[in-house]
Amino acid sequence: MAFRKAVKGTVLIGGGAIATVFGLSQFSQYRNKHGTLYVEAAEPVLVPMKNHFPTREEQLLTLQSTSEFDVLVIGGGATGCGCALDAATRGLKTALLERDDFSSGTSSRSTKLIHGGVRYLQKAIMKLDFEQYKMVKEALRERANLLEIAPHLSAPLPIMLPVYKWWQLPYYWIGIKLYDLVAGNQCLKSSYVLSKSRALEFFPMLRKEKLVGAIVYYDGQHNDARMNLAIALTAARYGAATANYTEVLRLLKSTDPRSGRARVCGARCRDVLTGQEFDVKAKCVINATGPFTDSVRKMDDQEVPNICQPSAGVHIVMPGYYSPDNMGLLDPATSDGRVIFFLPWEKMTIAGTTDSPTDVTSHPIPTEEDVNFILSEVRNYLNCDVEVRRGDVLAAWSGIRPLVTDPNSKDTQSICRNHIVTVSDSGLVTIAGGKWTTYRAMAQDTIDAAIQTHGLKAGSSRTVGLQLEGAQDWSPTLYIRLVQDYGLESEVAQHLASTYGDKAFEVAKIAQVTGKRWPIVGKRLVSEFPYIEAEVVYGVKEYARTAVDMISRRTRLAFLNVQAAEEALPRIVDIMGKELNWNEQKKREELEAAKKFLYYEMGYKVKSDQLTDRSEITLVPSDIERYKKRFHMFDKEKKGFITIVDVQRVLESISVQIDENTLHDILNEVDLNKNGQVELNEFLQLMSAIQKGRVSGSRLAVLMKTAEENLGRRVVIPVDRSGGGL
């Protein structure tokens, strides 16, 4: 509704404005056919860049042995790492502390878009709000820069806005054209209108009824956690002492001899992994902790009012067949007025996000209510031939967006959509608000404020156009060299090139020989994803210290398919154990911690809620009889349950061999009361849940159906996970 009103507002500008937009859009289209993005590079960086970034142990030693840093940044998200990179490249002696892993919070749980904010532009025009316009203009400039400095991790993405009423077509077209025009010479590609037939050609799963046409515009998309890590690693190469799993316990203060006032001069820290405590002294301390902004501000002053207004945004991941490979979808007006994106990402489909008030926590949990809301909105836009099943949700997560109120504003209750930089009486610099896309501009403003407030000697920012880790020698055809030089699968090579850029060769060099004719090297962690074991070894070099780091931020398995992540965990823990000298007890702890993370934070819990021992059986009598017959084919003795022995007996009769461990896992998925056997009632509950779309991809259901159909014939029964979801 807000989107519609906003675009209506633009029409009030009149016919002359429409003609102007049309004329300028033609110029923009011509420019984009004959030119490329224009990003003006900053002054060259004079600080030498290290060939190898230091180990975590070396970074901790630097933190403890340095008498005083110029800048100490608290927070290892996109903004914090951006601050560290900006400061380090200006020649400032820089430290960064993160109590968890880099990008462990909001920065890894985004919509994966690099965008200016279409809806903010509409609000800016409707309300004649120049501040919102400037925010969009800045975000579009930063969008172009981010695509330029990390081309291996980001790319332009066309997004379709389907139109179901004729009057909406010119309204939406004008709004989207204005978005292009505000981007100026940094417009990715010109937006365009599609007829109904062309829209369905591009997005065949779109709902056809009453479809008038569609408008396609361009924004950017990226691998958010890997982008965050690239910023952190680049900062480390430029000399910043960065350490994850290093918690700030309290701020240190000293008395200014000139003013007699207490000034923040560092922080008391603790290595979370070893428990060792130490002080880090700095001339300036920067608070870049996102949703935890107020907790650090209160370390400085207990009486300071809160400025953070946390909002939870839930996303879900579904199989890739729900969307085209290279076309997203925007629902501009959901049933409750929110905006929903439906985007291809890493060969899967992301849908989200919600927007609801929440408490600040390190472990946000997606709710079933939010998951069902997103599924409901998705159903509204997809063809009725496409059954949107709850069981197709492969992963779900919640991220906390740190909206803020400006403490310097007269209206301290109103939400500030842009970022704010504040300096406390004791000199603590706080950066809050903003968005992923503008992390670099936020960092620049923060370091500018730090230099001015604390009298630091440094020049202007040098991060515009500064390439991030892996971008230097990357090219779109780099993966071909990986295939040719190392014998990697093409899919694996493409994944390595798009994840590590020119550092993909370092991963390929340590990849193990498979012993097969092809591929020659590169053992996969799970069969249906291109992640290989060598990435775990390299991930430790990239400061990964827990199994959760590896499945969620070095690889993105947890965000793509929680069952695949769980399947990969034992091997990941074994490899990390060798690299980090874990004993058996530590390995068990890591395995359990990672499973708990998947269960609560990545949506595995809502999987178990779909099929429990309390699940209703809603099958019609004929289906019940059919499934009983199938069950009794395995339960010859009419015991009322089946075990691994029963399944093995049937499989042997049709000459199929499946190892006992795999069979145990298959039955365990359906063994609701965990007594080592699958009872008839549990099997009927499973089939009922499958019929209702609440469960999909059950290996036991597929195995039993296939065995029934092929009993007496020699067939191979597939037991890999089918891609079904939570």
Image (spheres, helix red, strand yellow):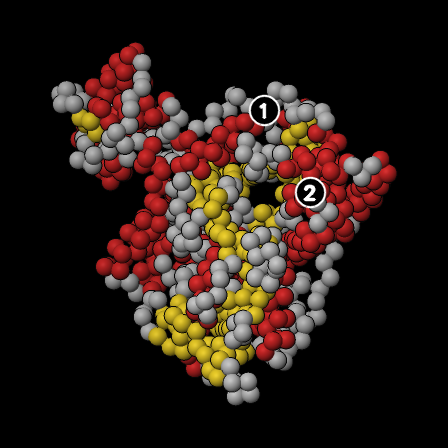
Q: Is residue 43 visible?
A: yes
In this view, 521 is above or below 714: below
Query: Which residue ends up furthest to the top in the rendered image?
Result: 622
Location of residue 668 in the rendering, given as x and y in whole percent from the top left corner: 25, 36
Q: Which sits in the foreground, 377 or 125?
A: 125
Say the numbered circle drawn on residue 207: 1
Location of residue 24 in the rendering, given as x and y in whole percent from the top left corner: 83, 43
Q: Tell me the kind of residue under disc 1.
A: Arg
Say the numbered circle drawn on residue 544: none
Q: Is residue 672 left or right of residue 478?
A: left
SS type, badge 2: helix
Residue visible at 20% across and 36% down? 674
Picture mark count: 2
Location of residue 69 in the rendering, given as x and y in whole percent from the top left corner: 51, 79
Residue visible at 31% across and 17% down? 619
Residue visible at 75% across and 43% down? 178
Crowd class of label 1 (few under 14; some 14 to 19; many from 20; radius 10 Å): some
Q: Is residue 436 left or right of residue 3?
A: left
Location of residue 337 in the rendering, given as x and y in whole percent from the top left corner: 57, 36
Q: Tell me the kind of residue under disc 2.
A: Gln
Quadrant where the C terminus is found in the figure: top left
Residue visible at 45% across and 38% down? 370
| Cα separation between marks 1 and 2 | 26 Å
Q: Is residue 49 visible?
A: no
Mark 2, residue position: 122
Q: Earlier in the sequence, mark 1 or mark 2?
A: 2
In this view, 372 is above or below 134: above
